[in-house]
Amino acid sequence: MKTLLLIILYVSFTLGATAKTITDMLGREVVIPDKINRILPYDSKTSILLFPIASKEMARKGALPGKKHYSFISDKYATIPEIDMKNMEEILAIHPQIIVAGFHEDSNQSETMKKLEDRLHIPVVMVDLSIDHLDKTYSFIGKLLHKEQESKIFSQFLSDLYKQVYTYKQSTPDLVNSVYYTIGSSGLMTDPAGSKHTEVLTYLNIPNAAKIDIPSGGHAKVNLEQVLMWNPDYIFAAGFKGEQNAYSTIQANGRWGSIRAIQENNLYKIPAQPFGWFDHPPSINRIPGVIWMCQLFYGQTATSTREKITQFYQLFYHYNLSQTEYKELFE
């Protein structure tokens, strides 16, 4: 009965707004209020995406498993309350005008989002989280919120980066050095080529050493014998849901020492503040990872890398990253 009352109150709350029909980035027609000032991000991916341009309109943010502390981002992000998207009453009680949900290029969530709309009677707007479409995504969000001018600076930054990446890839079309990407503390959990969790590598044409099928249930567990056989040129280690990354574990275990990446001192921690540069979640936070990989694999200067990443933090995280803090990201 309480839930039904909240739905009635929500419908009454939104009917007063002038409605319009839009086509979202998944090609769905959605009826939304013309003026939007209360947005509910569907999860942490869309929370991070929306924050730069819609921090005032975000009624809540999605929780990121294992993440309790956010460094190098505006304090405003931490003050936005988290929400449990499984709690229907909690969602309705905050009166969101729309829910914004992200999708990746290879996913089809139309049916899932239709069910969510039918259940909550709240319009769901889908936006593209694919790593090479984010300039268009910010243009779309700008139009959605009548913030076209504000969105241009984000779209332009991304568009300029995409053009630079295209130039790099054209000049060096056949990278051969392979990467083993590991998450969690053991060093033996990974994501192969084609996974949304390794889009940074795929986008940059960097060979993924993990020669296994994409797991249906999440990340893939492997054994050390497989990694030894793959013999990657680089290893990048990331934390996972509160676990530390495997950097120290790999260094301390002599069996890893025969791998080319270790012999050539190409073991790296992936920066994780305020969010991972490769993944977790797979959203706008991966762009610094793209910039960093351009230095390691395409000869971009360290100075240019630092300048671009510092600009990213200023624009997308509303944070002025000092040179000292930039170094701390890699420690």
Image (cartoon, rainbow, N blue to C red):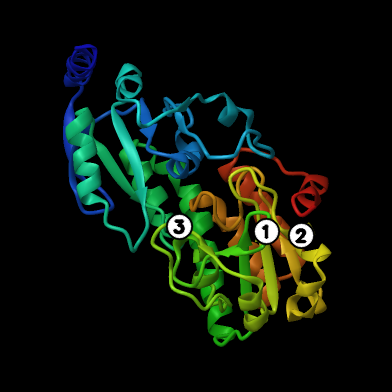
Q: Quadrant of residue 15?
A: top left
Whichever of callouts 1 and 2 sits on the residue coming sooner in the sequence is 1
**Badge 1 amino acid:** Ser
Q: CA distance from mark 1 to mark 2?
A: 7 Å
Residue situated in front as seen by the camera: 7 or 203: 7
**Badge 3 amino acid:** Gly
Whichever of callouts 1 and 3 sits on the residue coming sooner in the sequence is 1
The residue that label 1 is drawn on is 186
Q: Secondary structure at mark 2?
A: helix
Residue situated in front as seen by the camera: 253 or 97: 253
**Badge 2 amino acid:** Thr
* x 37%, y 57%: residue: 104
* x 44%, y 73%: residue: 213
The residue that label 3 is drawn on is 218
- Image quarter where the N terminus lies is top left
* x 31%, y 40%: residue: 144
Q: Is residue 91 left or right of residue 10?
A: right
In the rendered image, residue 74, in percent from the top left (x then y), is placed at 63, 33
Cβ–Cβ under 8 Å for marks 1 and 2: yes
With respect to residue 191, does 173 lie above or below? below
Residue situated in front as seen by the camera: 106 or 1: 1
With respect to residue 103, does 61 lie above or below? above
The residue that label 2 is drawn on is 249
